[in-house]
């Protein structure tokens, strides 16, 4: 109310003028986008809320990753927001700056990759599959929700079998019980081929980051789950640059140092009720 009274326009994403409505109840906009004057953009895991500032004692300390970009790639982020605004309001935003200043000395190859159920193809799935299949040295993935479909699991297994260092980082203390249980169900088939899974111990880890070899990394909103692959409107910032890749490598290495390995034996040695709950959660994975 305070924002509205101050002149801020706030719209729910799932409303649209007219008779048709392309959005189903299970779809949602999961993008986190900030664009400033068409010159600077921010993309990543941070929403606007107290818990993201570490003020929720149950979730603190909060671990997330956001990226700031400048230059021509800002056009892509702004276009994603403008399209979302059109779906919500039926309004084409005018007066936007579509000619951001070039970054002096900037040589980073950057791509803003929006994805969602309105796309003709499953953009997020295709991106992750392509990155995993082309990796030669490593694939490091950090995601709070790890409920991939079979083709993603197979791609991770094949990568590990050809000698790629495949690591998955998930939170030790999930904020969603069903998703947390589902993650256990993947341990055996991943561990069998050399994929390593780690649980981040402090607070709650919410970042969505992928590092590919020593060359590329992505930061965005898409989790490693069916909801992000097919049901959510997401956005990822893909950056191809060795220096940025080294920065992400150091960041994730620090996260692994605060983590503990997860083993398949945790499930096989667990009680029958727990193992049953994990199996039920896995069966419901496509709905999570």
Image: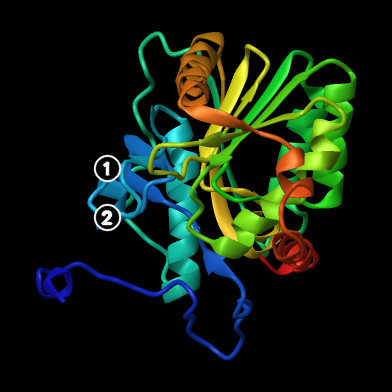
Give the camera-side residue of 97 and 233.
233
Would residue 13 be found to the left or right of residue 230 on screen?
left
Would residue 63 be found to the left or right of residue 183 on screen?
left
For the residue carrying disc 1, how many other residues have a C-alpha within 10 Å: few (<14), some (14-19), or many (20+)?
Answer: few
Q: How far across and how far down the image is residue 264, in percent?
A: 76, 39
For the residue carrying disc 2, how many other residues have a C-alpha within 10 Å: few (<14), some (14-19), or many (20+)?
Answer: some
Residue identified by numbered label 2: 56
Give the position of the N terminus as an image quadrant. bottom left
Can residue 147 be spotted in the picture?
no
Q: How far across and how far down the image is residue 2, in percent?
A: 11, 72
Give the camera-side residue of 168 and 241.
168
Q: Nearer the viewer, mark 1 or mark 2?
A: 2
Which residue is pictured at 24% across the width and 56% down the height? 50
Mark 1 element type: loop
Which mark identifies residue 107? Answer: none
Which residue is pictured at 29% across the width and 71% down the height? 10
Who comes first in sequence, dot 1 or dot 2? 1
Q: How far across and how far down the image is residue 266, in percent?
A: 70, 43
Residue identified by numbered label 1: 37
The residues bearing labels 1 and 2 have C-alpha atoms spaced at a distance of 32 Å
Asked if marks 1 and 2 touch (Cβ < 8 Å), the reply is no
Quarter of the rendering containing residue 56: bottom left
Q: From the viewer's perspective, is residue 192 above or below residue 11?
A: above
Would residue 176 be found to the left or right of residue 57 on screen?
right
Give the position of the C terminus as an image quadrant. bottom right
């Amino acid at each position: 109310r305070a924002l509205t009274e101050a002149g801020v326009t706030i719209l729910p994403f799932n409303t649209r003028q007219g008779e048709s409505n392309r959005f189903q109840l299970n779809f949602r906009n999961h993008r986190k986008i900030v664009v400033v004057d068409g010159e600077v953009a921010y993309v990543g895991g941070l929403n606007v809320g107290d818990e993201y500032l570490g003020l929720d004692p149950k979730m603190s300390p909060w671990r997330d990753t956001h990226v700031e970009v400048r230059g021509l790639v800002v056009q892509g982020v702004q276009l994603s927001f403008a399209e979302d605004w059109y779906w919500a309001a039926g309004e084409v935003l005018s007066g936007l700056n579509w000619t951001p200043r070039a970054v002096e000395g900037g040589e980073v190859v950057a791509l803003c990759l929006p994805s969602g159920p309105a796309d003709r193809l499953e953009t997020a799935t295709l991106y992750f599959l392509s990155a995993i299949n082309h990796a030669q040295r490593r694939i490091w993935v950090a995601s709070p929700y790890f409920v991939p479909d079979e083709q993603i699991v197979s791609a991770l297994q094949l990568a590990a079998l050809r000698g790629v260092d495949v690591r998955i980082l998930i939170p030790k203390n999930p904020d969603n019980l069903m998703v947390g249980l589902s993650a256990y169900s993947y341990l055996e088939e991943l561990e069998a081929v050399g994929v390593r899974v780690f649980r981040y111990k402090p607070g709650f880890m919410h970042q969505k980051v992928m590092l590919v070899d020593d060359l590329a990394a992505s930061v965005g909103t898409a989790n490693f789950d069916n909801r992000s692959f097919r049901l959510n409107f997401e956005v990822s910032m893909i950056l191809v640059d060795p220096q940025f890749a080294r920065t992400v490598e150091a960041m994730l290495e620090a996260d692994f140092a605060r983590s503990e390995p997860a083993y398949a034996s945790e499930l096989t040695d667990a009680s029958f009720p727990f193992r049953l709950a994990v199996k039920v959660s896995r069966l419901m994975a496509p709905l999570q």
